[in-house]
């Protein structure tokens, strides 16, 4: 799972390296005024929640730092993606159990594994990358979008099977 997360973040980093600050900060009318930067920040915060947790046992996704500088500083965002990929590469704890809580929803605590939370971060990232794709299309930047960017692996595999069958 760690490798899939790293590959996903690498795709995001490669895309961002093609953007200007203005494109990164552009507020999409189709996405209620949110920018690519806001979606990138949000993606990274979820990874940060499981990677930098001091106790490495308890994670509360609703208590994120919300570093607004990542939203507006493209270079910082790329650096943070690189740091996240390095942090992921140094982990070997996919079976470690974590206590998960989202206090914005409930006071209930759930038990999960680091691997399961990585999967959640990956799917969460793909979802926000699909939204980033909308902003890129709105900005007439379709040519820089990798064909699989913002698509789940299962969707990519399904599309490959159905196109081969035709």
Image: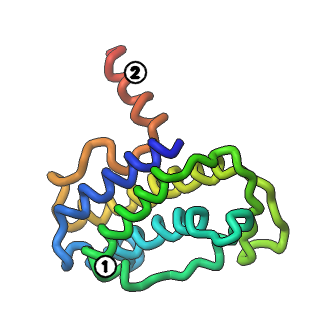
In the figure, 17 relative to 9: above or below? Answer: below
Q: Residue at x 32, y 57 (%)?
A: 12
Do the CB atoms of the residues marked 2 and 1 lie less than 8 Å apart? no
Q: Residue at x 32, y 69 (%)?
A: 79
Give the percent coordinates (x, y) of residue 96: 71, 50
Give the percent coordinates (x, y) of residue 16: 25, 63
Whether residue 158 sits left or right of residue 22 in the image: it is right
In the image, farthest residue toward the top: 165
Whether residue 117 sits left or right of residue 98 in the image: it is left
- Name the mark on residue 161: 2
In the figure, 50 relative to 104: above or below? Answer: above
In the figure, 139 relative to 89: above or below? Answer: below
Location of residue 69 (image quadrant): bottom left
Location of residue 30 (image quadrant): bottom left
Q: Residue at x 42, y 85 (%)?
A: 68
Residue 146 vs residue 138, the one in the foreground: 146
Q: Quadrant location of the C terminus?
A: top left
- Residue at mark 2 to residue at mark 1: CA–CA distance: 36 Å
Q: Residues within 10 Å of mark 2 (few under 14, many from 20)?
A: few
Secondary structure beneath dot 2 equals helix
Location of residue 101 (image quadrant): bottom right
Q: Residues within 10 Å of mark 1 (few under 14, many from 20)?
A: some
In the image, farthest residue toward the right: 108
Give the percent coordinates (x, y) of residue 90: 49, 52
Q: Residue at x 56, y 63 (%)?
A: 51
Secondary structure beneath dot 1 equals loop
- First in sequence: mark 2 vs mark 1: 1
Whether residue 34 sits left or right of residue 63 in the image: it is left
Residue 165 vs residue 9, the one in the foreground: 9
Task: Provide the residue designation for mark 1.
Answer: 27
């Amino acid at each position: 799972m760690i490798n899939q997360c790293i590959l996903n973040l690498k795709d995001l980093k490669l895309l961002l390296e093609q953007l200007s600050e203005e494109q990164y900060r552009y507020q999409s009318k189709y996405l209620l005024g949110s920018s690519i930067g806001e979606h990138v920040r949000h993606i990274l915060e979820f990874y940060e929640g499981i990677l930098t947790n001091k106790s490495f046992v308890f994670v509360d996704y609703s208590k994120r730092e919300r570093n607004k500088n990542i939203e507006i500083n493209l270079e910082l965002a790329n650096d943070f993606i690189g740091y996240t990929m390095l942090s992921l590469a140094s982990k070997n704890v996919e079976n470690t159990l974590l206590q998960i809580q989202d206090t914005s929803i409930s006071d209930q605590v759930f038990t999960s594994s680091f691997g399961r939370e990585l999967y959640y971060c990956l799917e969460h990232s793909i979802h926000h990358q699909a939204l980033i794709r909308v902003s890129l299309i709105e900005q007439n930047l379709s040519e820089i979008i990798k064909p699989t960017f913002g698509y789940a692996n299962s969707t990519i595999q399904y599309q490959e099977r159905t196109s081969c069958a035709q």
